[in-house]
Amino acid sequence: MVDALQQLLQGVFGPVFPLVWTLLKIVLIIAPLLLGVAYLTFWERKVIGWMQVRIGPNRVGPWGLIQPIADGVKLLMKEIVIPSGASKGIFLIAPMFAFAPALAAWAVIPFNDTMVLANVNASLLYIMAVTSVGVYGIILAGWSSNSKYAFLGGMRSAAQMISYEVAMGLALVVVLMVSNSLNLGDIVKAQGRGMFADNGLGFLSWNWLPLLPMFVVYLISIVAETNRAPFDMAEGESEIVGFHVEYSGMAFAVFFLAEYANMILVSTLTAVLFLGGWLSPVGFLPDSIFWLFVKIAAVLFFFLWIRATFPRYRYDQIMRLGWKVFIPVCLIWLTVVGCWMMSPWNIWK
Amino acid sequence: MEFKTFVFYFFAAIMVFAALRVITARNPVQAALFLVLTFVSASGIWMLLQAEFLAIALVLVYVGAVMVLFLFVVMMLDINLDRVREGFWSYLPLGAIVALLMVAEMGLVLGGNYFDLFENKVPQAAADATNVMSVARLMYTDYVYPVELASVILLVGIVAAVVLTMRDRRKTKAVDPATQVIVKAKDRMRVLQMPSEKQG
Amino acid sequence: MTLAEMQFVIPDLRPASAELFMLAMACGILLVDLFVKDKKRTLTFVLTQLALLGAAVITFMTSTGEIAYTFSNMYVDDLLGDLLKLLTYLTVIVVLFYSRGYVLDRPQMAKGEYYTLTLFATLGMMVMISANHFLTVYLGLELLSLSLYALVALNRDSVQATEAAMKYFVLGALASGLLLYGMSMIYGATGTLEITAVAERLYQGQANKSILVFGLVFLVAGIAFKLGVVPFHMWIPDVYHGAPTAITLLIASAPKLAAFAIVMRMLVNGLVVLAADWQMMLIILSVLSMAIGNLAAIAQTNLKRMLAYSAISHMGFMLLGLVTGVIGGDARFALNAYSSSMFYVITYVLTSAGTFGMILLLARAGFESDLLDDFKGLNKRSPWFAAMMMMMMFSMAGVPFFVGFFAKFSVLQAVVAAGYLWLAIAAVIFSLIGAFYYLRVVKLMYFDQPNDPSPIHAPFDVKLLMSANGLAVALLGIFPQALMSICAVALLRSL
C-alpha cells in the first residue's frame, strides 16, 4: 500500500518527489506528536487528580476530552503583552529556541527497524547537540523580559539544565560503549542480543539491567533537565517567579508546549536507550511499534507520578545532586563498565 | 547548479552576514546570538564536507556550552558599548595593517591551487569506518600523548578557576545539604504515648 | 569493527617515565592537599619537593646517551633534554625553598594549590623540553603558561598582581596564537608537524619557500614572546613588577630553560635549512633587546623592574650565540655557538634565581622589599649576604672571574669566530652601559646607610641555599670548564 502511494506521488510530483516524501514523513511524525503533547497536559491533570483522590477536568466535552482544545483556544485569544524596554526581537524568538530543538530531535528517533526519518550514523550525538540548544530559549526569555525576577529565574533554570546535561551525557556515553555504535537503531538491536534474549526473556537483556545505576541517573536527570517537579525550582509555581513570568498568550503556550514536547522526547529516548525500543519483552510476542508506545507511556506516567508525590527540591540541593552525586556515580560506573568489557565476563560481544 | 553547491552558497552567505553582524551589532547579546548563527552555518558547511562528527561536535561544544557561557557573562556584565567603541578611529591604521597582512597570507594559501603550491592532497577515508570511529582510533593510538596533555591543561584550568575565585563560606549559616538529606524521621520526631484526657 | 579488532601497540613508556611520574605526583598531591589541615601546608611542600627529586632520579636513571623517540615520534629523549630537565628540577626545588617564607606570610597565597600549580608548570616545561612535534611544543607551552597565569593572580586581593596577571594572560594568548599561525603555515608547506620529518622534507627541497618564510616569521614571533626579547618584551617589566616576588622568581628562572629548549628543537632541529632567514631575524631581535634592555634599566628605581629589563638584555645576548651557528651554509661553528648559548642560559638562570632569592630573603609580611633603596647598607646588616648579592651583580655585569663573564666571553668568541665583528662590538658596548646599574646596587649595599638597620631573619635552609647559590656563581666562574663541556657533549649527542 505504501508502494502504491509512492508510485502515485512520484507520478504527480516528478523531480521534487524526495522532498515531498520527506515532508510527508515529517508531518506524520509532528502531527501525532502535537496531538500527544496537547493530550499529555490533559492526562497529567487527570492522573494527578486521581492520585490526590479527586477527579481531574471532566466538564468540557465527554469525560473532559475537549479540555486541551479549550486551553489552546484560550491562549490563542489572549493578547501577547511585550514588556516596555524588552528587546522585542529576542523576546519573540526565545520560545522558538525552546520549541524547535524538541521537534528537530525527532528526525533520528527509530520507531521500528525500518521506520526512521533520518538513519544517521551519529544520531545519539545529534540528539545531544540539538537538546543542548534548548537552553538558549530559557536564557533569552529570562534576559529579554527586562525584569529582574525573570532574569534570575532564567539564570537558575539554565544553570540547572546545563548541570544535568553533563550527567545525562555521561550516562549516554556508557550506553554508547556497550552498544558499540552511535546509531539509535543499532543501540536497540544490540539490546535484543544476549543471554536472556536468546532464552525468551528479552526484557532482562535490555540496557536497564546491566547499566542500572546509569538508568536511575538518566531517569532523574531527564526530570531535572525538563524542569519538572520535584526539580522545578526555576518555575516553582506557588513559591517563586520563573523565566516565563512576562509571557502571555501564544508565546507562553509555546513554552508550555516545548516543556511537554521535551518530556515526550526524553521519555522516548529512555525507552530507546534503556528499555529496548520497539523490542518485545518476551520472546513469543512479536516486536512492534506498539511496544515503543507502551514504554513511552510508562515513562511518562513515571514523570506524572513523581510530580504528584515528592516535595520540591531546594536550588542548592538540585545543584549538589547534579554535580556532587551524579557525575561521580557516572564516572565510576563508566570505569566499571569499561573494565567489565575488557574482562572475560564481557556480555556485549 | 548542483543542489550541493546551492546549499554551500546558502550556508556561506548566512555565515558571512552573521559574522558581519557580530562585529557591528549594537547590543552585545545580539552579537552573541549572531555568533551562534555563524557557528551553526559553519557546522552545515562541514556536514557538506562529510565531516559529520566535527559538525555535530561544533554545535554540541561551541553552541551548547561555550556560547552559553558567553551569554551568561555578557548578560551579567553591564557593557557600555559606546565606551568600548570610542577608540575606533585611532586604532584603525594599526588594525588595517594587521588585516592586510592576514588577507595577503590567506590569498597566498587559497590561491596556492593556481600556483601549484600543494603536493599534499587530503586523504580519502575508508568507506566503512564512520567518522567518529576514525577520529577515535587516531586520537587514542597515534595522538594519545597530545590528548592526555590537553586533558591536563583542562585540569589546570579547573584548579586555577577554583583557587582564584572560591571564598571561605564560613560566615553564612547555610545548612549542608549532604547532612540534610540523610536525616531520618526518628532523628527529628519522638512519638509519645499519653493517656487520653476526659472532658470534665 | 568491534573493540577487539583494533590494533593498539602500547608506546614505549620508559623514556617518558619522568613526565608520567610528575603527572601522577601532581594529581596525587592535589588530592592529598584537600585533607591537610595544617595552615603551613608542610606536608604538601615536602611531597612536592620529593616529587621533583623523584623525577630527577628517574630522569637520571633512564638517561642513555642515545636519542630515543616514543609516542609516535612526538616525544624525544636525548642528552640535551635530560640535562635541561635536571636543571629545571633543581631550579624549581630552589625556587620553592626560597619562596616558602614569603608565601606563608601572605594568607591568600598560602594554599596548597601554589605547590600543585608549580608542579604542573614544571610538567609543562618538561613536555616542552622533550618535544619532537609542533603540537607537543604548543601543548607544553600552554600548560606552562596557564599555570603561571594562575600563579601570578594567586594573590587575588592585590591590585598589582591581578593587573599583571591580566596583561600576561592577554599578551600570552596573543603570542600563542601567533605561534600556532606559524606552525600551521609550516604544516601547509611541508605536510607534516613532526619536527624531524619537517627537517627531512626541507632537506629534500619538497616545500614552498614563501609560505615557509611567512610561517617562520610567526614562529619566531611566538618564541620571542616567551623568551622576552624586543619587540615582544612589553609584558616582562609589568609582569615581573606586578607579580608577587615568589612568582617572579619562578617566571624569571626555570621557563627560560624551556624556552631555550624549544628554540633549539624548532629552529635548529627542525628548520635548520632556513637558518639564513631566522638567523637574520634573531640578530635584529638580539641587538634591539640588548639596547633597550640595558638603556631602560638605568632609569628604574624598583629592583624587580630593573632585573626585568636586565632579563631582556640577557636574553638578547643569549640569542647572539644562536645566530652564529650556520654561516653561509657551513655548520662548522654550530656546536661551539649553540653550546655557548646553552651555557649562558644555564648560568643566567642560576644568577637570576639568586638575585630574586635575595629580594625574597629581605621581604616580610606586608613589606615587599623590592625597591633599590631597601638594599641600602646591606653590608652593615649582614656582610655575608651583601657579599653574595655583590657576586651575583658582578656576574650579571660580566666582571671577570665570575661565571657571567665566562658566559659572555664564550658567546662573544663564537660571534667573532663567525665573522660578525660589529655585532660583538655592539654587544660589548651595551654590556658596558649595562654594568652601570649592577654596580649601582653594589654601591648602595656597601657605601650607603641602611633605612632599617635590623638584622636579616631567614630560616636556616634558605640561608644555606642562598650561600650555595652565591658560591656556585663564584666557583663556576673560576672552574667553568666542567659545565661547558657538559653542554657541548649534550648538544653533540642530540643534534
Image (cartoon, coloured by chain):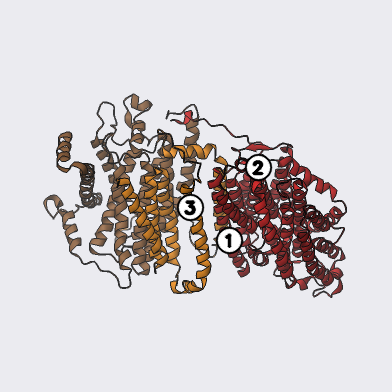
Chain colours: A brown, B orange, C red
Q: Which residue is mark 1?
A: C169
Q: Specify the amino acid type for callout 1.
A: Phe
- Rate crowding at label 2 as few (under 14), some (14 to 19) or many (20 or more) other CA atoms within 10 Å: some
- Rounded to the nearest angstrom, the CA distance separating label 3 from label 1 is 38 Å
Sequence-wise first label, 2 or 1: 2
- Rounded to the nearest angstrom, the CA distance separating label 3 from label 2 is 35 Å
Label for residue B178?
3
Q: Is residue C18 above or below residue C384?
A: above
Chain of the residue displaying label 1: C
Label for residue C21?
2
Residue C179 quadrant: bottom right
Instruction: Label 1, secondary structure: give it.
Output: helix
**In which quadrant will I find the C terminus of chain C?**
top right
**Residue B188 in view in this figure:** no
Q: Specify the amino acid type for callout 2.
A: Phe
- Rate crowding at label 1 as few (under 14), some (14 to 19) or many (20 or more) other CA atoms within 10 Å: some
**Nearer the camera: disc 3 or disc 2:** 2
Instruction: Label 3, secondary structure: give it.
Output: helix
How many labels, in total? 3
Q: Specify the amino acid type for callout 3.
A: Ala
Q: Is residue C23 above or below residue A57?
A: above
